[in-house]
Amino acid sequence: MATQNPEAESFYRQGLELLHAEKYTEAIEYFSKAIALNPECAEAYHMRGELLTMSGSIVEGNTDLQRAKTLRSGGMLSGGRKKPAKIGKINLREAESIYDQLSAKDDFSGNDSVEFSDELFDHAFVDDRVETKQLWDGFIDPSCPEATSPAILEFVGGGREEVFRAQLFQPSEDEITILPADAEGSRRIVPLRELSCIRLSRLPADCEQKMDSSCQVEIIETTDGNIYHEYISSQQPMKNGLLAFSTKEATLFPYTFFPESSIKLRYQERFLGDILLEKRFIADEILKKALEEHQMLRSMQLGKIIARQANLLCSVVETAISSAHAKGLQGLRIGEILLDAGLVNEEQVMDALDFQEKLQGRKLGEFLIEKGILREKELYIALAEKFRMPFIDLRQQKVSRKVLTILPRELVLEHTALPLRIEDATLVVATPSPNVGELREAIRAYCDLPDIAFVLAQPTHLKNVVGILYQDRRRHDSDN
């Protein structure tokens, strides 16, 4: 491993030794230490990515592998050698025919050659599959105005269309215009609400944006169930949607626009634990032990759960299983074996199954709160950051009576959602969950405002406030 940081190299080598000893959790820890000291260490990213993928953390593993690939293809080659400078980009629009231009040269020398590594050929070596000639021609069409771009439209519910030219936010901010490839064609208007996303070759001049250090890989889930991994900048130039940068190294379509109406959920490709550590809500060693206990509980076998709840020794359970196997009862489940042996009753087995289901579905944040390691407010501040949502303290809010009645009582109680205010024709709603796709659609059915924005609040506080404001006390009293 080529590095100028001896300590980082030491951590990396210790990680390799732990890997060979099949101590995978410890190996990940040492590769992470190497990365912390040397963020340009492609080998450490690669090894950590392989281990994370193998352990089931597919998203995090792929992120590390992609980072390693990017570092290896960056400004330095293996061995620390500098990458040769690129040849200047050739403007395709200046040459009607490259072949004719080459043929017209009279002063050929023995060393004359065409290098396919030249930026001129970038579009030829991308991973994207372009199915129509019209779309391909759009990349080098000299008459294509700057306000338009070759694009791929992905429609809600399925369907994909390659278009020669697309013009964003025309004729209105909630529509795009599809321009014809020839004089015989006609323009077409497509509402943004019909699109899951739009992949673009370039951006309009008034929306120009470049990747910067604020860009983070996020996962975008659309309302039709598609999942995208894209770079997202903290600065968004478009009000009616989300502009993203492709995570592909070589692509004809470096930009993706997600209409606001198509976004079901968006969140950072970061561990919640990393955010908690960054905000110093929890200590590293405490988090590590809590993660081990959480994983152990989630993977607890049913036999151990039954033994604990029925006050049975594990040796008694194991003896019953061995006896059943000796009798040739291979297909029975553990609960059936213990029932047959008379060690437990049916109610105890059903209680154990319910308990196992709760353990497997218990999220890390809930577990940390139950253990008293984390406060609910700290968890939801971290979740708000992960899911790119503002966090609010309800104690600091003032809500007008008019806003409180903008949504029906049944909707508010069903979703535990509280309307807070109206800003610039946007209804701001507090919610206890980052997953707001269903809530957004429910609100749109009752609210005429063009935009809805969501903020995250502590569930306990929100439930109590909604109960006080919207509970029908007369019905409650009559029920009692």
Image (cartoon, helix red, strand yellow):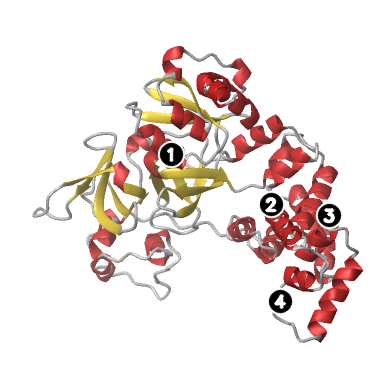
Q: Mark 1 points at which residue?
A: 209
Closer to the chain start, of discs 1 and 2, is 1
Q: Mark 3 points at which residue?
A: 6
Q: Is mark 4 on a helix, strand or loop?
A: loop
Measured in 3D between alpha carbons, the distance from the residue under mark 3 to the one under mark 4, in whole angstroms, is 56 Å
Q: Mark 4 points at which residue?
A: 332
State which mark lies toward you, 3 or 2.
Answer: 2
Q: Name the residue under label 2.
A: 358
Q: Going 67% across and 44% down the picture, which residue do you hit? A: 272
Closer to the chain start, of discs 4 and 1, is 1
Q: Nearer the viewer, residue 295 or 212?
A: 295
Q: What element carries label 1?
A: loop
Q: Going 68% across and 62% down the picture, which residue do you hit? A: 46
State which mark lies toward you, 4 or 1.
Answer: 4
- Disc 3 crowd rating (10 Å Cα; few below 14, some 14-19, many 20+) is few
Q: What residue type is labelled 1?
A: Gln
